[in-house]
Amino acid sequence: MHARAALATLLAREGQLDQAREAAIGVLRVDERNARAMLAMGMIYRRQQKFELAALALSQAFEIEPTLGEAYAELGLVLLAQNDRRRRCRRSRRRPSSSLGLGPS
């Protein structure tokens, strides 16, 4: 199972998300507490911009294996992406004149 979970993370890193998902799910069907398969799912969800699911999978990965540094790094990328998305949403909600400095002085 370890080799299949490692394959899932490698495929996710390479952007082969369908194959990575298939490999990770195969591992999780046999061992639902496989931290590396959860890591792979988190990586897949992050690349799909499903940030809440990514954070959940990654949290489960390092809950199972607290020394899995790669899960913490991936979670950091998820949090950065979420923060960036929030900033873009806030900017788009501003009135165009105020964001261009054309509002009242």
Image: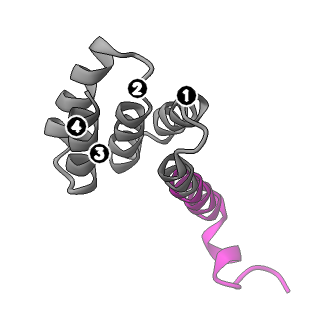
State the CA–CA distance, disc 3 to disc 4.
10 Å
Relative image position of residue 100 (x, y in whole percent): 64, 82
Residue at numbered disc 1: 64
Q: Residue furthest top?
A: 30
Residue at numbered disc 2: 34
Numbered disc total:
4
State the CA–CA distance, disc 1 to disc 2.
8 Å
Which of the pair 86/73 is nearer the observer? 73
Relative image position of residue 34 (x, y in whole percent): 40, 26
Question: If you read the primary sequence from the N terminus, does the residue marked by circle 3 or circle 4 appear first?
Answer: 4
Disc 2: CA contacts within 10 A as few (<14), some (14-19) or many (>=20): many
Disc 1: CA contacts within 10 A as few (<14), some (14-19) or many (>=20): some
State the CA–CA distance, disc 3 to disc 2.
12 Å
Residue at numbered disc 4: 3
Q: Say which of marks 3 and 4 sits in front.
A: 4
Where does the C terminus fall, quadrant-wise? bottom right
Under mark 1, the amino acid is: Ile
- Which mark identifies residue 9? 3
